Each structure stands twice: as structure tokens, then as C-alpha cells.
Amino acid sequence: MAKTLPELRNQIDAVDLELIALLNKRAALAHEVGEIKRLDGSTVFRPDRENQVISNLQAVNQGPLKDHSVAIIWREIMSACRSLEAPQRVAYLGPAGTFSEQAAIQFFGGSMARVMCVSFDEVFRATAAGSAEFGVVPIENSSEGVVSRTLDLLLSSPLHIIGETSFLVRHNLLRLEPRLSNIEAVYAHPQALSQCQDWLSTHLPHADRRAAPSNAEGARLASTNPAWAAIASERAGSEFGLHVVSYAIQDDAFNRTRFAVICLPTTLAAPQATGKDCVSLIVSVNNKPGAVHDLLVPLKRHGVSMTRFESRPARSGQWEYYFYIDLAGHPSEPHVAAALEELRSLCAFYKVLGTYPVAE
Ligand SMILES: O=C(O)C(=O)C[C@]1(C(=O)O)C=C[C@@H](O)C=C1
């Protein structure tokens, strides 16, 4: 006979009692690890170890929980364990409700300490100055391309990339009034305005498009005037008491944004190899015929795949460029090390931005 609702709930309560005891047992062990780290002065947060923990569990997971859910649950468990030592101070573009905040929570879990900044420049400054241990910044969007300010800041910054995270970004039109009519102006970060430009031209051709420092700040502005709207996440809407007038208005249904996690090399050295890693570099070559082709030769020779290739003007006025290159692999693998060494010998400028595990 099928179990009744009270019987099932009693069983769930009993399992939860076992879980809370086990979780606390786990937290006590993690705390012991934390003590060892405190004595030898090493960093509490070890993203490579966390990825290993999650992939070990996914390998034995028989469901019904999905592997993706296992990753989310254990990220939070480890975030809670880390916070017993000291919560990681993480800088990102605020206010509350930005996609950067969502990215930071996805990477560090909800037990981090939040350092909200007014611009990407401030995220870099706060992280380099030590008021935050880590920074989270958007690096590229699948429909709009690179976030050029982030790339330019990475060039001159002492910070390196130790991780990445990405998710589908859904933009919504938010407003005090639950209607699409009589909207004078739409506020959003310039990236969001351009990711929704077709929708805006079709549905709100007469509304003024106004740039805000962040989508969440746009939502705050929209909460001050009923004739204004904002493009932002549902979370930002509920933060500022706005209605969602239209859902998912981004022009590309698969609009994905990738974020980089940055820190000083003294906070955390490059994560160890996990088997699914990436090396990010910035290089430049002297402006001569075939120079870019030459860059690719060592990669081909040593069998290293290039997963990304972007260029940014070097601002020398000479039509020179910096190339932002991502390679699959880890420098501890001999073929990757050999390719990097050869590449370095060809470049007028060569900077390793970081080596880190690739996001799922
Ligand atoms: O294994 C460690 O180094 C730990 O500190 C334990 C633990 C965990 O909870 O499993 C916590 C923090 C680290 O980021 C990695 C893993």
C-alpha cells in the first residue's frame, strides 16, 4: 500500500536528522583541515580540491538527484565549511541583485562576505588592495562578445584568474506599473541594452535608452519613477518592488555570460590540474606579415587546442593588437608546457593571466 503523506514526512524528518549529524561531522573535519592551513599560513579556499570533491560525487551519483544539483548542494556545503574559518571576501559589481552577484554566489556559495563595488575598475582595485580576497568580473557574453573593460583591466593588473563560472542570462523588463504602455525611459547597463536592442526597437521604439552603472542600479532608478522601466534579473525586480512586465526579452535565447574569478597570486597560487583546465594568456607580436600565423604553429606542433582568440587594440596608434588566448590544458602537462615555452619565444609581449579549471 502507498505510504501516506504524514508517513513520508516522518521518514524525511528522520533522514534530515541523519543528514544534519553527518554535515556537522563533515564541518568538524573541514575545520580541522582549516586549523592545519591556519598554522602553515595557506589559503582556506581551494577551488581545485572543491572541483575534485564534486566530480568524485558526480561519478558515483545514481540519482534521482541530477549531477548539476549535486554540484550546487556541495558548493553550498563547502561554502558553509569555509565560512567556519573566515568567509571569503568577494568583490563584484553591486548593488544586490546583479548578475555579477549571481556569478559570485554560483562560484563561492552563499556564505561568502559581499564586497559590492560601483564599477569593474573598483572590483579590480578592491581585490588588488586586499579589501577583498577575490573579485568576480564578466569577461564575455555569447551574443555581445567580450567585455572590453575587463580585458583592458586584466592587461595592466597584478591580479590573475583562478576560476571561471558562466550561466544563461535572462533579461526582464521591470517596472512599478504592471503595463508596457507609457514608458518614457528604460535603464540598464549598456551590455544589457545592447543584448535587448531588437526587442526594445519592436516593443518600445519611443522609449529613451539610458545607461546605468549596473542593471540592479537601473532597477533602483526605475523604482523611483512610474514612467521609467529597467532591464534586469527577477531578483533585482523583487529587491526594488518592481513588476516583471515582460520575461526573457534578450534577443538571443541562449544568451550566456562567462565570469572570471580573480585574485592576487599571493592570495591563491594557480589551481592544480583537474583534467579539464584552461590557460589564459595575453600576447602581442611585432607587426610583420605572418606573425599571427606563427603564433599558432607551436600549438599545432604540440597538439594544444586554442579555445578562444580575441584581439584588443594596443592603443599605440600603430594598428598593433594584444591577443587574448585561451588554451586547453594545464602547464603541468609536458605538451602544454612545451607549447607555452615556444609561444613565449615568439612574442614581443607575453603574460599568463591564469590557469584554472574550466566551468561546466
Ligand atoms: O580540503 C580542503 O582543503 C578543505 O579545506 C576542505 C574543503 C571542504 O569542505 O571539503 C573546504 C574548503 C576548501 O576550499 C576545499 C575543501
Image (spheres, rainbow, N blue to C red):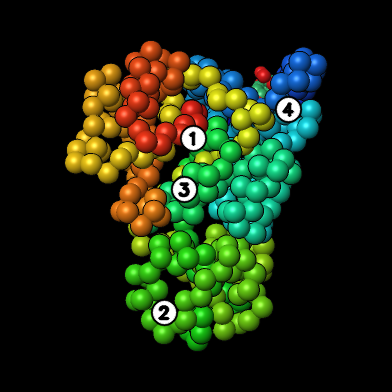
Q: Is residue 332 left or right of residue 103?
A: left
Tell me what residue is drawn at x 60 percent, y 68 percent: 219
**How far apart in space, not on screen, are marks 4 and 1 (Cα)?**
29 Å
The residue mark sitting in front, 3 or 4, is 3
Q: Nearer the viewer, residue 91 or 12?
A: 91
Mark 1 residue element: strand
Mark 2 residue element: loop
User: Crowdedness of circle 3 by 10 Å Cα count: few (<14), some, many (20+)?
Assistant: many
108 vs 241: above or below: above
| Mark 4 sits near ligand 1, with its Cβ under 8 Å away | yes
Going from N to C along the chain, the mark reached first, 4 or 1, is 4
Q: Position of residue 3 (x, y in %)?
A: 62, 30
| Mark 1 sits near ligand 1, with its Cβ under 8 Å away | no
Q: Is residue 107 left or right of residue 320?
A: right
**How far apart in space, not on screen, are marks 2 and 3 (Cα)?**
32 Å
Q: Nearer the viewer, residue 117 or 129?
A: 129
Q: Which mark is residue 353?
A: 1
**How far apart in space, not on screen, are marks 2 and 4 (Cα)?**
48 Å
Circle 1: residue type: Leu
Q: Which mark is residue 172?
A: none
343 vs 121: above or below: above
The residue mark sitting in front, 1 or 2, is 1
User: Crowdedness of circle 2 by 10 Å Cα count: few (<14), some, many (20+)?
Assistant: some
Q: Which residue is mark 3?
A: 151
Quadrant hosting residue 51: top right
Q: Which mark is residue 81?
A: 4
User: Crowdedness of circle 4 by 10 Å Cα count: few (<14), some, many (20+)?
Assistant: many
Going from N to C along the chain, the mark reached first, 2 or 4, is 4
Going from N to C along the chain, the mark reached first, 2 or 3, is 3
Q: Position of residue 238 (x, y in %)?
A: 64, 63
**How far apart in space, not on screen, are marks 3 and 4 (Cα)?**
33 Å
